[in-house]
Image (tube, rainbow, N blue to C red):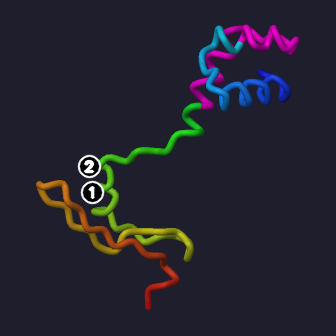
Amino acid sequence: MLSFGVKNAINEMYTRGIRKPKPVLSELRKQSIEEPAIGQIKNFLPYKREKETDTIISIGNLAHISESKNQPLHDDDPYIVASEFNTDLEEKIIPTLRHILP
């Protein structure tokens, strides 16, 4: 497991554009920071990328979610009241929160 200091150093490098394992390892050596195994860096970088990128939902997934029309368990959970999808990939979605409905 990477130490807190190593993670911070890698995060700082990531923001500067150093995003490949070997350059990260080289930079850690230059900065005299404890050197983790290359495998640990290879595991951490995809995790970092995944956490920083937006989740992409396909139209098919969105249509499936909107068709389920499950009532939320909590008042502040969003859900879809109505939706319409057509072959031109145009969609109309009406989201709401449970406590807003009468």
Residue drawn at x 66%, y 32% is 15
Lateral position of residue 79 relative to residue 91, left or right = right
Q: Quadrant of residue 63?
A: bottom left
Q: Nearer the viewer, residue 65 or 6?
A: 6
Q: Is 29 situated above or below 63?
A: above
Residue drawn at x 61%, y 21% is 19
Q: Secondary structure at mark 1?
A: helix
Q: Quadrant of the C terminus?
A: bottom left
Q: Secondary structure at mark 2?
A: helix
Q: Quadrant of the N terminus?
A: top right
**Amino acid beneath label 2:** Gly
Q: Is residue 99 magenta?
A: no
Q: Residue furthest front?
A: 16
Q: Which mark is residue 31?
A: none
Residue topped by disc 2: 60
For the stretch drawn in magenta, the main secondary structure is: helix
Lateral position of residue 53 relative to residue 56, left or right = right
| Chain part drawn in magenta | 25-48
Residue drawn at x 34%, y 73% is 94
